[in-house]
Image (cartoon, coloured by chain):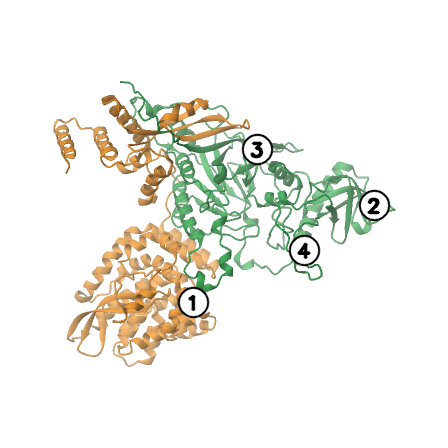
């Protein structure tokens, strides 16, 4: 159990001691695991793509799908005596429950209409890290109407998008506003119990490799590859590493600097011969992936800076980009968000864009808290399509969490953090933020047996001290 | 050889004679050479890849070497870096697993911070003192690049499921994906790429085939059908790269007359053709049906296509004096079997038409097969076309060899292939006493590449396969013109 809080390694330092009797060519077999993909709702059929629809369908689908779940949750919480009313049926002064989509009105929110409007004559708004302020107002929208929400609900910790059930009343003297006493979201859906796994099985998460950028950590990345493929380490460590069954490369494998949006504006004759920055970077990434794929199952997700579509759900990176790595059957190109299960453990997560968006439009500081909130709201990306780019879905909203995962992760975050979230029905969800590799040189191992996480940091330190030149004394 | 080396060799021979030579000592000798003589930075991974031994054995060897050197002399001048891993508690109180490469001096310091230590072994040995990790990374990187697929073959962990896909699987995949997304150019590329990467052996064959082809031209008159199949498969990647920069060479299009637009379409459709061996399709007589089909599709073509066809016509003009065969052969070179077909009706009475017809079936059948796909796809088909063309050319030459006085002449032929590359090749042309010339089948198309780094990378194998580009002056005296088209 080397990759745990209490490692008990054996064979340490074997290769710096006198040779033992055994030959040094132990080969460990990597454990295999069953894998199932649940990604179908995120994938597009190429023929069906149509961007000419409006987003209203997505919202109405969301509301329609979640309304029954919310009514159940509301009735469980407040009992059956209070009626569930639609906004147009509200009676003044009557305590009731209303279900609708939350909308947060923010003055500072960048709006293209304001920018181009002539009467305002505004300069384009500067880019800020947070667009929230004190005066933000919450509004509840259902199918037909909207109403202001005041009272016991804080705008700063809410975002646009989740479907909410509020309990309160519309005061007689202040029509148009709903006074909230309590509110709730859907119950965390049922979770299939985790199967009992006897041996340790690990999944390695790595994100934010950002090849092609200034911060790329190629040596540390090579150390990661060497470790996972079983070249680094003493025998005990190699044996433990053979229990890593899957590597998830969770987005931003290319750096932002490889995206050259300026070339779109330049004249063709200037940019004809320049190769895109992402070309070299993808080749390096292919070299990285082919080494990993020769030894372990690899899933590669697209991220914000990767050559995939901008709107969520991001489609798989195309196979042709990884010609060498694709010659192995172990490479899988997957969507963002990614929903799958390994050995019966259900894992759901994204490359971090939804969480980053919530950061921009709310006051919550801790990324793990934001992740937990999205789990409570029951939606992977609540701010889509309002402030987060999203495909105009028509038939269903695929981001609704309808089956509770065992592991819920968000990649490309600032640091590693993890917590177990306990649901009302005994569900246990491991919330995990995977840090950016280019900044922290850290990847995360999740043990499927007990949902423990262990970050692994790769380091290379050479001191520049030139004084000590003589080699140390060796046993003579 | 240096005296040092000579003495070493003598020692070796002595040891062999004395039967004391063991594998280990052989390795140690090698290690000695690497470190002292060649002044290399020997990492355990580099050593394991070079000597083709298990990584753990390499680590052991490094240690034994250090022991040996340090026991012999006080100062060996060797610098050693270690890999050490263990659990550490960082500033936030988070327990994390730290894996670190440190120089010997810092080893104990770092070790003391880890509790427990899970690994500690030698990472590299070298004479030079390292300031940072760049040199370490570089040596390993170069070694890996030499053969990327065997980079992890000496590791301590094997995974049975990690098998390389066979060609047919990749082809099938690309077929299904292409049928789902006829508009996707990339699928064909993918189709081409794994094939190219996994068939390096084919690439070698292709090279030799290229040279053999010229020879066979003069010696045999048989149709090398089998070669066609192989060569075709090698070609996909080539055409891929060639295809890509095509739009960028739009400026050159004006040099070429607007040839059949259909020919362009044919290319596209060809691309979508999956790996069904064109050889099988050779016999299917589809030529006459195709022109109609193609013309119908022509209406959908974009500007690029018209440019291509323009090119074709100009090319035809340039070689006005050539016979039918030549025209057909030329168009073949351009991956345009259709032009063959088109010229056919124009000169139906040509005695040589049977042979072109014979040759055409393969590309034509390809076109027919891919009739459904109307979009511009990459190299896959164009490569196949190349293959067919080359074989066709061979056939052409073979079948149309007449009893004429022939003089072998080295001529530079310039043409624009479907990717938009101007390709100039020196070809042996047999000048017969008649006005018509026969072209020898060209060696596999060399790429005057282009700008597409991605394609280049995707087919490093193909690049090796293709013979080096012959930069002969285009059109005889206009030397300066070729330099204009070379990649800057």
User: Looking at the rendered structure, which numbered label has been put on residue A418?
Assistant: 3
Q: Residues within 10 Å of mark 3 (few under 14, many from 20)?
A: some
Farthest front residue? Answer: A467
Sort mark 4 into few (<14), some (14-19) or many (20+) by Cα contacts within 10 Å. Answer: few
How far from the left and from the top, in percent, is residue A376? 66, 39
Image quadrant occupied by the N terminus of chain B = top left
- Image mark 3: chain: A
Chain letter for the orange colouring in the rendering: B
Q: Position of residue A379 (x, y in %)?
A: 63, 44
Q: Comparing marks 4 and 1, which lies closer to the viewer?
A: 4
Measure the alpha-carbon separation of dots 2 and 1: 66 Å
Quadrant assignment, res A411: top right
- Above or below, A470 against B168 in this view is above
Give the answer, above or below, for where A110 lies relative to B400: above
Residue, x 51% and y 55% (percent of image)? A261
Above/below status of A95 relative to A17: below
> Which quadrant holds the C terminus of chain B?
bottom left
The answer to whether mark 3 and mark 1 are in CB contact below 8 A is no
Circle 3: element type: strand
Earlier in the chain: of badge 3 and badge 4, it is 4
Q: Is residue B269 visible?
A: no
The residue pinned by badge 2 equals: A170
User: Are the residues under badges 3 and 2 in a single subunit?
Assistant: yes
The residue under label 1 is B371
Residue under circle 4? Answer: A56
In this view of the protein, which residue sits in the foreground, A175 or A110? Answer: A110
Q: Which mark is residue A450?
A: none
Chain in green colour: A
Per the model, the C-alpha gap separating discs 4 and 2 is 26 Å
The residue tagged with tag 2: helix, strand or loop? loop
């Amino acid at each position: 159990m080397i990759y745990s809080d209490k490692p008990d390694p054996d064979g340490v330092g074997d290769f710096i001691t006198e040779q033992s009797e055994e030959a040094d060519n132990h080969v460990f077999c990597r454990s295999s695991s069953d894998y199932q993909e649940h990604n179908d709702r995120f994938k597009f059929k190429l023929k069906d793509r149509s961007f000419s629809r409006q987003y209203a369908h997505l919202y109405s689908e969301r509301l329609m799908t979640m309304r029954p779940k919310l009514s159940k949750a509301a009735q469980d919480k407040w009992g059956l005596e209070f009626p569930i009313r639609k906004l147009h049926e509200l009676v003044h002064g009557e305590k009731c429950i209303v279900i609708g989509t939350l909308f947060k009105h923010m003055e500072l929110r960048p709006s293209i209409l304001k920018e181009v409007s002539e009467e305002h004559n505004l300069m384009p708004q500067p880019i800020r890290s947070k667009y929230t302020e004190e005066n933000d107002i919450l509004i509840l929208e259902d199918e037909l109407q909207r109403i202001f929400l005041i009272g016991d609900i804080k705008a700063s910790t809410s975002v646009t998008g989740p479907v909410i059930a509020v309990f309160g009343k519309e005061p007689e003297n202040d029509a148009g506003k709903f006074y909230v006493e309590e509110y709730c979201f859907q119950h965390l859906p049922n979770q299939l119990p985790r199967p009992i796994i006897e041996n340790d099985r690990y999944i390695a998460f790595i994100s934010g490799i950002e090849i092609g950028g200034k911060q790329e950590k190629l040596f540390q990345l090579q150390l990661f590859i060497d470790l996972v493929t079983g070249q680094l380490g003493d025998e005990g460590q190699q044996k433990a590493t053979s229990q890593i069954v899957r590597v998830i490369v969770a987005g931003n494998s290319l750096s932002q600097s490889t995206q050259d949006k300026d070339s779109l504006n330049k004249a063709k004759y200037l940019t004809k011969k320049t190769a895109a920055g992402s070309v070299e970077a993808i080749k390096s990434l292919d070299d990285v992936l082919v080494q990993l794929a020769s030894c372990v199952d690899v899933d590669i997700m697209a991220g914000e800076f990767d050559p995939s579509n901008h709107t969520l759900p991001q489609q798989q990176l195309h196979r042709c980009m990884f010609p060498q790595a694709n010659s192995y059957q172990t490479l899988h190109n997957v969507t963002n968000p990614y929903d799958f299960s390994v050995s019966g453990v259900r894992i759901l997560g994204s490359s971090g864009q939804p969480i980053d968006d919530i950061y921009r439009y709310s006051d919550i500081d801790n990324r793990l808290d934001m992740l937990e909130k999205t789990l409570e709201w029951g939606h992977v990306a609540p701010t889509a399509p309002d402030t987060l780019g999203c495909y105009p879905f028509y038939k269903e909203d695929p981001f609704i969490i309808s089956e509770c995962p065992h592991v819920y992760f968000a990649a490309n975050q600032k640091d590693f953090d993890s917590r177990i979230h306990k649901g009302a029905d005994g569900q246990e969800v491991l919330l995990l933020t995977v840090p950016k590799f280019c900044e922290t040189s850290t990847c995360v191992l999740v043990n499927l047996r007990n949902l423990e996480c262990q970050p692994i940091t790769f380091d290379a330190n050479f001191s520049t001290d030139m004084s000590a030149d003589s080699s140390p004394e060796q046993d003579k | 050889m240096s005296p040092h080396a000579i003495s070493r060799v003598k020692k070796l021979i002595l040891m062999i004679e004395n039967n004391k030579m063991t594998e280990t000592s052989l390795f140690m000798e090698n290690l000695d050479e690497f470190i002292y003589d060649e002044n290399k930075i020997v990492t355990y991974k580099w050593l394991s890849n070079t000597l083709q031994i298990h990584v753990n054995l390499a680590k052991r060897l490094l240690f034994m070497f250090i022991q040996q050197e340090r026991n012999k002399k006080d100062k060996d001048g060797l610098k050693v870096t270690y890999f050490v891993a263990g659990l550490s508690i960082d500033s936030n109180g988070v327990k994390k697993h730290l894996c670190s490469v440190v120089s010997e001096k810092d080893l104990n310091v770092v070790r003391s911070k880890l509790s427990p230590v899970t690994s500690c072994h030698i990472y590299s040995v070298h004479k030079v003192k390292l300031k940072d990790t760049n040199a370490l990374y570089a040596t390993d990187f170069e070694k890996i690049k030499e053969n990327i697929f065997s980079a992890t073959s000496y590791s301590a962990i094997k995974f049975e499921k990690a098998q390389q896909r066979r060609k047919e699987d990749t082809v099938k995949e690309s077929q299904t994906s292409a049928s789902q997304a006829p508009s996707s150019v990339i699928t064909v590329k993918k189709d081409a790429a794994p094939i190219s990467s996994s068939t390096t052996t084919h690439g070698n064959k292709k090279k030799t085939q290229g040279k053999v082809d010229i020879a066979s031209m003069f010696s045999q008159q048989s149709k090398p059908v089998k070669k066609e199949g192989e060569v075709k498969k090698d070609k996909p990647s080539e055409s891929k790269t060639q295809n890509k920069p095509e739009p960028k060479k739009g400026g050159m299009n004006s040099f070429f007359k607007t040839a059949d637009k259909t020919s362009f379409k044919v290319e596209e459709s060809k691309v979508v053709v999956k790996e069904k061996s064109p050889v099988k399709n050779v016999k299917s007589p589809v030529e006459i049906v195709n022109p109609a089909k193609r013309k119908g599709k022509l209406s959908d073509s974009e500007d690029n296509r018209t440019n291509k066809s323009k090119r074709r016509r100009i090319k035809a003009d340039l070689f006005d004096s050539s016979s039918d065969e030549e025209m057909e052969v030329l168009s073949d070179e351009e991956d345009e079997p259709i032009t063959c077909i088109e010229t056919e009706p124009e000169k139906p009475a040509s005695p040589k038409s049977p042979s072109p017809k014979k040759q055409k079936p393969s590309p034509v059948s390809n076109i027919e097969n891919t009739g459904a796909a109307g979009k511009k796809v990459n190299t896959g088909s164009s490569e196949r076309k190349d293959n067919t063309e080359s074989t066709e050319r061979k056939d052409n030459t073979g079948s149309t060899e007449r009893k004429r006085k022939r003089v072998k002449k080295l001529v530079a032929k310039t043409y624009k292939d479907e990717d938009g590359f101007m390709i100039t090749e020196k070809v042996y042309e047999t000048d017969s006493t008649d006005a018509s010339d026969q072209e020898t089948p060209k060696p596999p198309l060399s790429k005057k590449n282009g700008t597409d780094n991605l394609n280049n990378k995707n087919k490093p194998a193909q690049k090796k396969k293709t013979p080096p580009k012959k930069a002969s002056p285009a059109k005889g005296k206009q030397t300066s013109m070729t330099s204009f088209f070379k990649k800057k």
